[in-house]
Image: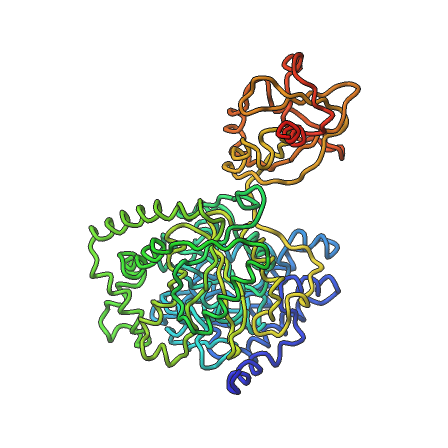
């Protein structure tokens, strides 16, 4: 790393060595007896004294923090014991940053445009949920003006740099949020992500950038960039922390017409074997670049974790990405700031960014007919890209194709910004979720990041995959110098919601690899365990069934244990699954060898009168193997 870069990093971190850096470590500190007021006041002083340049637009005053502490004390009054307190308030006394296009009651919101400034009458719902969970905001963080940009340089409040290099951009638009977390000033921050605004700065600062499925988190009280696409995102040092915060802020919001909270599956739609990881068949990275080399290493790492790499044609995805800035969606930005930017020069603040102005005012080039044509094209692309998930379970892409310097932005502000969205712009247009993760370090000491992209509502399985990835990479957390394995985690963290399921024990043609197993897979069921029943059953080969099926009957005496698989079947699909079960089979209650009762396949006793008793084989798989032999 160049000398100026090392100096930049050490200056931003020199005062933060004594504070915890992760959510889990903060909670562990409180379990160890630390005083919240002492830690939080130190956190605020650190944010004032040791912040990298241009991180904040508004930093809390002592009075702001005292007011929050008093409210927190009132909430927790009467609760005894730190365990119960953290159980009730999962973000108890945890400091965080808020991107300054998200409202906090009584505090100015600027969206990085002084002429747009207003004092919020109430907090955004995400902030309310964080406050109800015990979290306390430290400041409003800098951003690309009106969240228009992926560079982090389009703000009159300064241009944050990556914590790893004073010469390289922080990425945006959630620039200040990313830098605040990467520098160890707060353990997490809220950002927004329309085209990659939470993922790109995560990559440039060695962070986790969690972009949920659109609609999973309320956008009420958020200044829109593109209202139909905007997501509130979470920037954190670990996947566990990001998922914990998502579990707090997610949920239905009757006040947000784009709220669409649907808990998804807990795992991928597959029975067993390697995860199919899709990668671009044709890379848009410079062949001999550091990023190309790092991406190659990331793919090898994915293979080492046991995943299968599957080349995918990204043509339709890139066409989708092009719609965001080259299509009529730019007109959505005009609904927020268009009239302000059209005002006479003497009536607006001269600090309106020229690039932002040109992008937003380009909405005048699109007609209502263009908007409909764009919608038609997007709908067709959504149909075309749906088949991606027949080929793979998840996509793995470079978060950005390059890490620009400030000089690169000065030479070509629009072109560089457009290039940064190659692998991010299409995700929200298609309604998918994504998780940006650290993946390596270049020869110049700069971070390299990748992003996993998954279908809508797969926020939980993608977090589990990210957790595995981060643990195996074990890079320092942001610019703190602390590794994930050293961050400490005694306190159990929450996970986002998943759809309710029904455990179902299968004994025959629905077993893994058997002819009817696909009926479970296509309904999003996942294999929980392979076990046996309690020794109270007899097992029969039912004659004349296609495909061949067994019947299991509970008996009063003379029974034995039968091999079963227990699958977690989403409740929403139980009805359609039951409709496929032919007589004399049915779902009843089955006792497992550990004494647990689950729903499972049983057979009416009359149907086994003339059937072959195959109990001696101990299960359907062994019986079918004997027939094949």
Specify the quadrant of the image occupied by residue 504. Answer: top right
The residue that appears at 68% across and 55% down in the rendered structure is 492
Specify the quadrant of the image occupied by residue 81. Answer: bottom right
**Is 255 drawn above or below residue 584 in the view shown?**
below
**Is 468 drawn above or below residue 574 in the view shown?**
below
Locate residue 592, reporting x and y percent.
72, 32
**Is 93 drawn above or below residue 534 in the view shown?**
below
The residue that appears at 75% across and 64% down in the rendered structure is 32
Locate residue 26, reporting x and y percent.
66, 65
Farthest residue to the front: give it: 629
Depth check: give the residue in front, 146 or 556: 556
The residue that appears at 44% across and 44% down in the rendered structure is 390
| Residue 507 placement, left or right of 107 | right
Locate residue 541, reporting x and y percent.
64, 21
Depth check: give the residue in front, 259 or 92: 259
| Residue 365 placement, left or right of 471 | left
Farthest residue to the right: give it: 557
Res 49 visible? no
Depth check: give the residue in front, 19 or 314: 314
Q: Count the numbered circles shown.
A: 0
Locate residue 495, reporting x and y percent.
60, 51
Quarter in which the C terminus is drawn: top right
């Amino acid at each position: 790393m160049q000398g100026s870069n090392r100096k930049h990093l050490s200056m931003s971190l020199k005062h933060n060595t004594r504070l915890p850096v992760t959510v889990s470590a903060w909670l562990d500190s409180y379990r160890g007896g630390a005083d919240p007021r002492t830690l939080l006041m130190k956190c605020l002083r650190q944010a004032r004294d040791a912040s990298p340049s241009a991180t904040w637009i508004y930093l809390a005053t002592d009075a702001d923090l005292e007011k929050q502490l008093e409210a927190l004390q009132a909430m927790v009054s009467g609760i005894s014991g730190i365990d119960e307190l953290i159980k009730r308030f999962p973000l108890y006394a945890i400091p965080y940053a808020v991107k300054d296009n998200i409202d906090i009651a009584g505090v100015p919101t600027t969206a990085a445009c002084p002429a747009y400034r207003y004092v919020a009458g109430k907090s955004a719902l995400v902030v309310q949920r964080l406050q109800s969970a015990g979290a306390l905001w430290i400041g409003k963080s800098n951003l690309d003006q009106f969240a228009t940009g992926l560079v982090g340089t389009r703000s009159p409040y300064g241009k944050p740099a990556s914590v790893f290099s004073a010469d390289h951009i922080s990425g945006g638009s959630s620039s200040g949020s990313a830098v605040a977390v990467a520098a160890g000033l707060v353990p997490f921050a809220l950002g927004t992500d329309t085209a990659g605004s939470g993922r790109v700065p995560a990559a440039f600062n060695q962070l986790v950038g969690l972009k949920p499925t659109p609609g999973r988190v309320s956008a009420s009280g958020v200044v829109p960039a593109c209202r139909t696409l905007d997501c509130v995102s979470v920037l954190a040092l670990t996947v566990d922390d990001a998922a914990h915060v998502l579990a707090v802020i997610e949920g239905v919001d009757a006040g947000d017409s784009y709220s669409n909270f649907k808990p998804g599956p807990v795992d991928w739609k597959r029975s067993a074997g390697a995860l199919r990881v899709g990668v671009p068949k044709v890379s848009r990275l410079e062949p001999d670049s550091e990023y190309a080399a790092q991406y190659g290493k990331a793919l090898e790492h994915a293979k080492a974790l046991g995943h299968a790499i599957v080349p995918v044609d990204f043509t339709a995805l890139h066409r989708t990405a092009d719609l965001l800035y080259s299509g009529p969606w730019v007109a959505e930005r005009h609904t927020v700031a268009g009239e302000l930017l059209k005002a006479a020069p003497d009536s607006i603040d001269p600090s309106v960014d020229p690039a932002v102005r040109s992008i937003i005012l380009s909405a005048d080039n699109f007609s209502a007919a263009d908007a409909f044509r764009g919608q038609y094209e997007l709908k067709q692309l959504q149909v075309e890209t749906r088949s991606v998930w027949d080929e793979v379970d998840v996509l793995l892409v470079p978060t950005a194709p390059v890490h620009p310097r400030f000089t690169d932005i000065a030479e070509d502000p629009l072109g560089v910004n457009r290039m940064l969205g190659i692998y991010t712009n299409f995700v929200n247009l298609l309604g998918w979720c994504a998780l940006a993760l650290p993946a390596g370090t270049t020869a110049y000491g700069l971070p390299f990041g990748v992003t996993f992209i998954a279908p809508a509502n797969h926020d939980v399985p993608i977090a589990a995959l990210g957790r595995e990835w981060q643990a195996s990479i074990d890079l320092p957390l942001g610019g703190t110098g602390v590794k994930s394995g050293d961050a400490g985690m005694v306190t159990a963290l929450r996970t986002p919601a998943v759809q309710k399921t029904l455990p179902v024990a299968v004994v025959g043609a629905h077993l893994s690899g058997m002819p009817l197993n696909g009926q479970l897979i296509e309904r999003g069921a996942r294999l929980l365990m392979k076990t046996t029943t309690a020794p109270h059953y007899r097992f029969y080969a039912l004659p004349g069934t296609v495909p061949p099926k067994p019947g299991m009957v509970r008996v009063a005496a003379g029974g034995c244990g039968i091999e079963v698989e227990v699958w977690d079947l989403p409740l929403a699909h139980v009805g359609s699954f039951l409709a496929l079960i032919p007589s004399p089979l049915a779902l009843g209650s089955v006792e497992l060898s550990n004494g647990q009762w689950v729903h499972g396949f049983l057979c009416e006793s009359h149907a086994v009168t003339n059937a072959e008793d195959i109990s001696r084989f101990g299960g359907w798989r062994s019986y079918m193997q004997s027939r094949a032999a």
